[in-house]
Image (spheres, grey):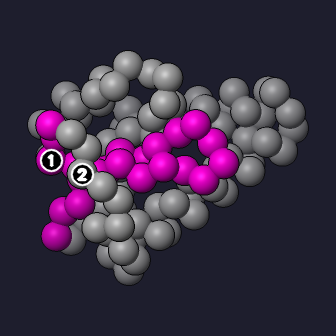
Amino acid sequence: MIPYDFDPDAEAEFDQAVARYEAVRPGLGAEFRKAVEGAITTLRSLPQIAGLFPGAPCRQYIVTGYPYSVIYADRTDLIYVLAVAHHRRRSGYWKKRLRRP
């Protein structure tokens, strides 16, 4: 499996989403975290499994059971998570993160 890393803003939004789910029902945040981490494990094994995001050099993988996608750059030696994006959030808000190393 290839390694992965989070963009700092992506990690913050992921943590915020976990906290929001946990506030809805104790334990739901942990379930959401497990679903996202499972998605990332899949991407680390099969980085090209997800479709290309229209108009950007990255991919979008839908998190099973939640209205979220993991947006990531499939680099040769790294899965770089650009966003853990809610499906109702403005599309492409994370594109500025593509310019980061």
Rate crowding at label 2 as few (under 14), some (14 to 19) or many (20 or more) other CA atoms within 10 Å.
some
Q: Is residue 76 above or below residue 63?
A: below
Q: Is residue 53 left or right of residue 57?
A: right
In primary-sequence order, the first of circles 1 and 2 is 2
What's the residue type where badge 1 is placed? Pro
- Report helix, strand or loop for mark 2: strand
* Circle number at residue 39: none
Q: Are marks 1 and 2 in contact (CB under 8 Å)?
A: yes
**Front residue of 48 and 15:** 48
Residue 30 x, y percent position in the rendering: 74, 48
Residue 75 in view in this figure: yes
Q: Residue furthest top?
A: 90
Q: Residue at x 36, y 74 (%)?
A: 46
Residue 63 x, y percent position in the rendering: 54, 50
Indicate whether residue 73 is drawn in magenta. yes
Indicate whether residue 31 is drawn in magenta. no
Residue 76 x, y percent position in the rendering: 16, 70
Residue annotated with mark 2: 52
Q: Residue at x 66, y 48 (%)?
A: 65
Q: Quadrant of the N terminus?
A: bottom left
* Circle number at residue 57: 1
Q: Is residue 60 left or right of residue 57?
A: right
What's the residue type where badge 2 is placed? Leu
Q: Residue at x 34, y 25 (%)?
A: 91
Q: Is residue 32 above or below residue 50?
A: above
Q: Residue at x 35, y 48 (%)?
A: 60
Measured Cα–Cα span from mark 1 to mark 2: 7 Å
Q: Marks 1 and 2: which is nearer the front?
A: 2
Q: Is residue 93 left or right of residue 89?
A: left
Q: Quadrant of residue 79?
A: bottom left
Rate crowding at label 1 as few (under 14), some (14 to 19) or many (20 or more) other CA atoms within 10 Å.
few
- Please provide the residue range marked out in magenta: 55-76
